[in-house]
Amino acid sequence: MRELVAQYLSHSISRRGFVNGLTKAGLTATAAQSVLGAVTSVSLAQGAGTTTTPYTPQGNATAPVPYLPHDADAPARAPSAIAGVKPFQGTGGAAFAEQLIACGVKYVFGNSASEDAQFYEALVDRAQLKYVLTPHEGPGAAMAAGYIKASGEPAVVMQAGVVGMVNAMGQIFNAWKEQTPLVVYSYRTDQSRRAGRDGFEEVANQEQLAQPITKYTWLARRPDMIPETVRRAFKAAWTPPFGPAYISWHSDYNDDRVRTDIIAQQQFDPRMRVRPNPDEVAQAAKLLVEARMPLLIVGDEIYRAKAAVTAVKLAELLGMPVTQVRQLYANFPETHPLWVGNTPAANLASLTFPKNPDVVINVGNKFQHNGAAPIVPRGPKFIDMRIDFASMGNVMLTEVPLVADVALGLDDLYAAVEQLMTPALKAKAHERAAEVRKFAEQARTLRALVVNNPEWDNSPLIADRVTYEIAKFSDPDAIIVHEAGSVAMHSFDFDPRGGRELFFYYGSHLGSGVGTAAGVKLARPNQQVICLVGDGSFIFGPTALWNMARLELPVIVVVYNNHAYSGPHSRVVANVPSGRMVQTGQFVHDYLGNPDMNMADIARGFGVNGEVVETPAQLREALARARVHTVEGKPYLLDVQVARRGVGWAEKPWVPPIRLAEIRQKRV
Amino acid sequence: MKFLLLATGFMWGGLVLAAPVLAQDAAPQHPGRAVVLSKCFQCHTDAMFRDQRQDRRAWEATIYRMVGRGALWTPEEIKVMADYLGAEYGTAAKPAAPPR
């Protein structure tokens, strides 16, 4: 009963939950209401003169700490008078749950772990913290990351010790590369009083495994430090530039009884928003207004800061063309007359227009360099506006580094440019805008030629036809989760200002697409979510389909199934041109057929309906059926048979001759 | 359709001028050759031409796949490139010499 009172006083349970708990404990309804009245008067008195109970270590550091059950007969701690600080006593696992709630976490994405028993126990009476059981840690972490990206809200991923952690590490890597504030916890399976004895699942220093791919890793040193460790992880992850954090503690800490403080997120997390240096803003504005042909490169910090509208305003003020190199999101409206398209390759030289910008400004793009050539060539003056200051100047020569929250930075830069705009400069910008518009219109016409492909009506379908049909089918505000790496996104006309949104991938640990889409749908239940995955990517992480079925997440999953790893195939040919592989057609690494995988059958195994699609006409009909399913709250999967295209592909590709039948001697 | 870094050889290439490797002889050059040279090597090396042997229609389809990836070519440019590649790198053309 004391526990119930403590939970009610700390707002961890509702009035109804409190009364229900009392009646379950044996009180009559009348008695429960009476207790509620008494406790409510205490609750109202909170903050009016009570004091925080200071932390008192329980015994010395080396003495065994006896396990006390959840409802142990310990005196309740007095409520705190300090806003946002709540004294807590209970198990370490319950302290973990309480601190997650205080951090604003609504969803825990986890895979089962017996050592987290006290955490699960704590969830029973904390309905506001919902546990999503994910049957594999990788797609589970992708689901959490998708939820975080689409909602802007915190979430946590938890797994069983190091064995679950290593399954999640691929998605931690992705979060690291794409700068997603993913907080990951797994206990250390070694008990604190028998560590180092090669116990079950034990590995030394497991937190160090995650260190190179996280912003922060930490091991709670005492059970009462669990909440502080959790707070620090959320603060690190959510302080820009964002990134993942990993925390851990000995599993017996979850069972130990602790007295500690739970602190609300707003009391410890500065969520800093940085304005740029005014001198540098003035310098950047001067460069831009004096430029013959400035060029704006947009990036994901714009999407995260919800600054697309300001980016558009700045481009319009200067009549400045806009492009983007590889990012997660589409950060500029693709139908805008100043949009000149994504760079076809990862450098500005691949743009058809403008050919020779003299000033380039990047706003929020992390710049993934995969080649020796800098994305922004050495020549134009370069202004780099980002909160991710650490990578500024590493590759490109930078004239003006503007370290800022890009929403504030764009505001300031817009104001500075506007001040400098004389009638003559406005006329120049107007003239330039007309030139850009003329190119953009022509480019739009030429992009539309994609439908003239002579293989447009082929079966199996060409990937561009699949993409085109889905683009025509998708809602005006659909979210496209894209993990079909060899497939080009065209025809969607993405627009971050409320139109179609793109959730691409950046880190290239495959198997994120289906999980990401599930998390996105959980965060945005009122928008159509379509997941595009290659067969290779899909098969790395289909288990999130089960989450879609269980949680009734109506996502349309489209698998571009060419029974092959197309990207690695093409790169191998490029790396060994005219080699033995090309001459003989013997590629050991890329063919996923023989037997062909049926993704619709796999989906059915997870409780998701689906079908195999072989022709363009079938695709349209299947998409219509998918819509019916999603309207009814059900996910649906299309396994679309896609043609293999590129150097060296045969109708029936060669398969490495490993045949057990030739060497086995017993029919067993 | 596994993707790690490169999408069908298109996405990440640097500016590589590979003109000497493309088919050439003393005869007047096909007008499509100059278009290919000026329009493809912002993104590609010559590897995609060297080892590919396919008919004109398949080359045309290849070019249209690049349109889907952001390449901006007029129908006339696409036609002349497909004519050239179909003639010089068609199914009857000699396979590329193996590397030494």
Image (cartoon, coloured by chain):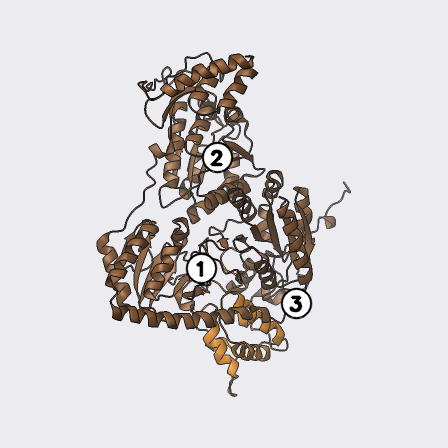
Chain colours: A brown, B orange
Marks 3 and 1 sit apart, C-alpha to C-alpha, by 30 Å
Q: Image check: A189 left or right of A60?
A: right
Figure quadrant of residue B38: bottom left
Q: Which residue is mark 1?
A: A333
Foreground pick, A559 / A557: A557
Above or below for A310 versus B30: above
Q: Quadrant of the C terminus of chain A?
A: top right
Subunit of mark 3?
A: A
Q: Residue at x 68, y 44 (%)?
A: A604
Q: Residue furthest right?
A: A667
Counting from the top left corner in percent of width and height, residue A64 is at 42, 16
Counting from the top left corner in percent of width and height, residue A240 is at 35, 44
Above or below for A466 versus A91: below
Q: Amino acid at mark 3?
A: Asp
Q: Image check: A259 left or right of A168?
A: left
Q: How many marks?
A: 3
Q: Amino acid at mark 1?
A: Pro
Q: Which residue is mark 3?
A: A457
Marks 2 and 3 sit apart, C-alpha to C-alpha, by 47 Å
Marks 2 and 1 sit apart, C-alpha to C-alpha, by 32 Å
The label shown at residue B91 is none
Badge nearest the viewer, 3 or 1: 1
Q: Which residue is mark 2?
A: A106
Subunit of mark 2?
A: A
